[in-house]
Image: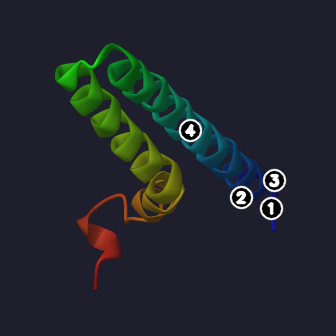
Amino acid sequence: MNHSSEFESSAIEILETLVSALGGGIAAWGMVNLLEGYENDDPELKDYGLDLLLRGSSVAALGPDMLRAGLAMPKDDSDIH
């Protein structure tokens, strides 16, 4: 493994961690909004909180795999056979 591929591999790992953390943060924010919606009996806040919770958990769960798949795509048409 040369220096360039080691750097790329570590950069991908860092990006995967950041995407997971971002998704987890969005999910936590959604949980707070959901609980506040139940506390205040606010249906709009409950819907918004549930939406954030589901989207954040999806980003945390699927984001790193999608990121790795997207970075592995060929750069131009010459790499496709």
Residue with the most extreme left position: 44
Residue with the mark numbered 2: 5
Q: Neighbour class for label 3 at 10 Å: few (<14), some, many (≥20)?
A: few
Secondary-structure class at tag 4:
helix
**Residue shown at 44% from the left, 65% from the top:** 69
**Residue shown at 41% from the left, 52% from the top:** 58
Secondary-structure class at tag 2:
helix
Q: Neighbour class for label 4 at 10 Å: few (<14), some, many (≥20)?
A: many
Q: Are marks 1 and 3 in contact (CB under 8 Å)?
A: yes
Q: Which of pointers 2 and 4 indicates the residue nearer the eye? A: 4
Q: Position of residue 63 (x, y in %)?
A: 46, 52
Question: N-terminal of the two: label 1 or label 4?
Answer: 1
Residue with the mark numbered 3: 3
**Residue shown at 66% from the left, 44% from the top:** 17
Residue kind at label 1, given as amino acid type: Asn
Residue kind at label 4, given as amino acid type: Gly
Q: Which of pointers 1 and 4 indicates the residue nearer the eye? A: 4
Q: Are marks 2 and 3 in contact (CB under 8 Å)?
A: yes
Between the residue at mark 3 and the residue at mark 4, the CA separation in whole angstroms equals 32 Å
Residue with the mark numbered 1: 2
Left-right relation of 12 to 52: right
Residue with the mark numbered 4: 24
Secondary-structure class at tag 3:
helix
Can you tell which mark lies on residue 50? none
Q: Are marks 3 and 4 in contact (CB under 8 Å)?
A: no
Name the quadrant containing residue 36: top left
Between the residue at mark 1 and the residue at mark 3, the CA separation in whole angstroms equals 4 Å
